[in-house]
Every structure is written in structure tokens, then in C-alpha cells.
Amino acid sequence: MVGGKKPSKRPAWDLKGQLCDVNAELKRCRERTQTLGQENQQLQDQLRDAQEQTKALGTECRTLEGQLATVQAEAEQGQQELKKLRARIVELEERLSTQEDLVQELQKKQVELQEERRGLTSQLEEKERRLQTSEAALSSSQAEVASLRQETAAQAALLTEREERLHGLEMERRRLHNQLQELKGNIRVFCRVRPVLPGEPTPPPGLFLFPSGPGGPSDPTTRLSLSRSDERRGTLSGAPVPPTRHDFSFDRVFPPGSQQDEVFEEIAMLVQSALDGYPVCIFAYGQTGSGKTFTMEGGPGGDPQLEGLIPRALRHLFSVAQELSGQGWTYSFVASYVEIYNETVRDLLATGTRKGQGSECEIRHARPGSEELTVTNARYVPVSCEKEVEALLHLARQNRAVARTAQNERSSRSHSVFQLQITGEHSSRGLQCGAPLSLVDLAGSERLDPGLAFGPGERERLRETQAINSSLSTLGLVIMALSNKESHVPYRNSKLTYLLQNSLGGSAKMLMFVNISPLEENVSESLNSLRFASKVRLPPVIPRPCQYLWVVVGFSIRTHLSSRPGSTLSRKVLDSQASGALLTWFHF
């Protein structure tokens, strides 16, 4: 090699050159071998050193391997701990985030609470100021309450005293009201002349006259004059005899123009007595077609102006009972409605299967030893308002026995008796009162011949008329016996007087309406009715003026109750035998 370049290949014939090249190559190989020997020696030395190092490193490696295993175990443990720590860090970071949010929320809430605290502080200060004001007002109010309590106690005492006084005045009013009714007469008679109806002949002038009272036209009418002419009689010269004038005087006379409310106003005080515990009895008497049923029940069509005494009386009772409830009184009302037809008692309120079966009704004593009477098989209906009464009246009209007569197209052939049992109680004072209110619409009072009906039912009409006249005659005898204070009163001679016996005597108050027809053709029957009513009427009791009334007002309620064992306003409901006829009120 020259200049580091590989010599070119010698030609085959240049052996010397080739030898030289081989020697040179051999020299180089020897040098190379020597160099390699040195290097080998060095490498062997290095190998020995390396082997020694290897041994040392092996020992160290084993040591390091042990340490590595230990470190690896520790690394694995550290990795696990690191994972745990990382998880813990994540958890703590989450908690930290939550806590930071909570801290922020709490800070906001703290701010709000601080604001609220400042507001509450101001409110507290305001409340404290108001509390101080309230305490001052409370002190003033307590003093005022103490004063008001004293005033209340005084007012309560005054109220109790006034209630006692009001009760005393109410009791005194009842007593004086009863005495006033007794002074007017326990048996009174009113006369009512009905107006001429459309289609009826106009009566001659002067047939009925209504003379004014002593005070002039302003005084209520109490007298009636009936002029009757008899064409069969005459004078010697052939001239007709002047009409005969018949004068009658009653407690009240209602001319044809009198309205229903005017009639009721006259008996309203009598109806009031029923609530006070006194019996009242009101009859409507008169011939057929004289207006008895109109007076008692009213006209058709439901016109309030035409309402009769029964609905008006019930309305008045309900109204007054409501007013008395403010004074501690409670009232109950039980109604019944029967008719007496041919001396047979029939229930006018029968409905359903009982209606038309003809179940017999008997008049019997309510209890053994009691004088109170009741009708068996009859309905007793509690009522509390006008509509219930109207329904009962409507049912009774449908069930009542009527027939055609010569006097009227539709004539009532029976006596109808509407009874309302009134019971009052003042529970706080232990007071009770009870009395029945009876309203009787009598059958036509005409004599036998004018009332006969012609046709197949003549015998039945004849028997009806005989029974009606017999019972009316018995009623007259009973009233006359009571007027004369006879020891025996023939109540049992008819079913009508037997049913009403507790309402016709003693302290019971009876009012008879004698109804008169204005027609000339009915003058004979009208005259008979007026004569009968005149016999029934008793003159009113005239007390000694001033001094007697002064003594009556001076009586105390306690003295009145203790000195009158017959009073119905006692500590218990008195037996009817002790109170006489105070158990029944009749009103028409």
C-alpha cells in the first residue's frame, strides 16, 4: 500500500514483486500479530480485570438484584400506595371542590344571614319599641278590662234582673190578657153577613141594617136589624102589613163589606190566649151557603187576601212563638182534622191505604184517669210552618163529605173539627203550658124541609139533615147549660159536644161566628140563626172601674201562681181535671 492505497495486482510474471509483496504482507501480518498479541495481552489483562470486575459485578449484581427485588416490591407497594394516594387525592379534590362550593354557599348564606341579622336587629328594635308600647297599652287595657268586667258583672246582674222583670211582666201579661178575655165574656158571638155573589138576586133595600154604636160610625158595629115582611098577612083595608123589624145585638157584627183580615184582627187576641195556655174554641154556625167555610178556610185560588181564620191563626201562632223563643219559650204544635158525619167520626187526614177504608174512629180518654180526649185511628201531625198546614187543609177539603142540596150546589154535610195541640216549655225556669186550639166548621143549620135534596139520595140527605140538626140542637143545649151554670151538661148527647167538652166549660173561651146569607129568600133561616146566636151570647162581665183594675195590676206573679191552682202556667202541666176546661182552645 502506498499512501494508504491498496497496490494494484502484479502481473503473474512478476514473482519478485509478488514475493516482495508477500514479505511485505507477512511483515504486516507479523506486525499485526504482534500488535494483536499486545492487544490480546491487553485484552487478557482487561479480561482478567473484567472477570474480576465481573465477579465483583456479579456479587454486586446479586446484591443489586436483591436490592432490585426489594426495590421492586417497594415500588409495587409504592405504586399501590400511589394509586391509593391518587384516588385519595381525587377524592380529596372532589371533597375540596364540594367544600369550596359549600364554603361559597356558606359565604353567600353568611352574607344573607348578616343582612337578615341586620334586618332582624332592626325589627327587634322595632318590636321592642312596640312591646314597650303594647305593655303600656296592656296595662291600660288590663285596667279597662277590670273595669269592663265590673261593668259586665253589673250588666249581667241588670240583665238577669230585667229578664226576671220581663218574665214577670210576661206572666202578668198572660194573666191580665186572660182576665181581659174573661171580661169580654167566655162565650162570645160574632155575626158576619156575607156579600151578594155574582148571579144572585139583589136583596131589597133595608133588609139588613147595621146601626152605629154610641160613638158613631167610628165604633165597631155590634147591632144588626133584619126586616121581614109577610105577604100572607094584611090589614082590614087590604093593605099589606108593614115589615116586622127584628133587632139583634152581638159582641161584633161584620157587614158584607168586611174583609178577611178585618175579621181575623178581631180574634187575634183570642188566638194569642192559646199560646198562653188557655183553651179557645171558635165555631162557624149558619145555614148552607152563608159563608162558614169561607170564613174558616178562605176562598179558592190561594189569594192571600182571601185566607180564612185557620191559616191566619196558624201564621199568627208560629210568628208569636218565634218571638217568645227569645224569652226562653219553646213551642211545639200537633194538628189533627176530623169530621163528624151522621154521628160517626172520620179522619180527614187519612192517606194511602187508610184513605177510604172507613176505619172507625172513636173518642176516648187519652190516659186512664185523665179528662183529656183523643180520637183513635186519627192522624196527629206535627207542624212547624204554614206550608205544612196548607197541605193538611188541602187534604181535608178533598176528604170532607159534601153533597148537593136545594140551598147550595156543594154543601158540607158534616162538622169539621181542626184541632192544634199547643205545648210550651220554659226549660230554664221549669215552666210548662199546654192547650189545644180547635177550629170548628159546623154543617148547614137549615131546617129539614128547605135542605132536602130531590132525587135517588133523598133518604140519605134526610138522615144527614136529621143528624146535623140533632147535634146542633145538642150544642145549643150544652151552651145554655153552661151559661146557666147547671150542674149537669149533656156533653154525651152528640159526638160533637163530647169531643169538645173540655173546650166548652170552665175557664175555656168560646167564640161563635153566626154566618148570615144576605138573600131575601133565606130570611127565615137567617132569622133562626140570629135567634139561636142571641140565646148563646152571654153579656160581658162589667168590672168595677179603676179600683178593681188597680188591684189586679198590683198582684205579684208568685201570689198569682200560688193562689190560682187552676192556672196552666205552673211548675208542671196541671191535670185537666184540676184545670177544668182549660185544656182546649177553639178558633175559626
Image: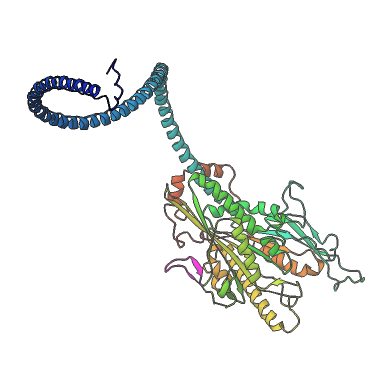
Residue pushed farthest front?
13
| Residue 505 drawn at (x, y percent) | 54, 62
- The picture quadrant where one finds residue 255 is bottom right
- Quadrant the C terminus occupies: bottom right
User: Does residue 102 sit above or below 469 in this rendering?
Assistant: above
Dominant secondary structure of the magenta stretch?
loop
Report the side of 365 relative to 452 (left or right).
Answer: left
Q: Front-most of 213 and 297?
A: 297
The colour mode here is rainbow
Residue 494 in sight from this viewpoint: no
| Start-end of magenta stretch | 364-376
Residue beneath the point at 57% across and 49% down: 320
Q: Is residue 373 shown in magenta?
A: yes
Q: Is residue 575 shown to the viewer in this render?
A: yes
Image x and y of residue 440, in percent: 62, 65
Q: Is residue 313 left or right of residue 18?
A: right
Give percent across and percent down for residue 584: 54, 61
The location of residue 188, given as percent across then percent down, is 63, 58
Between residue 266 and residue 300, name the one nearer to us: 300
Q: What quarter of the picture does the N terminus occupy?
A: top left
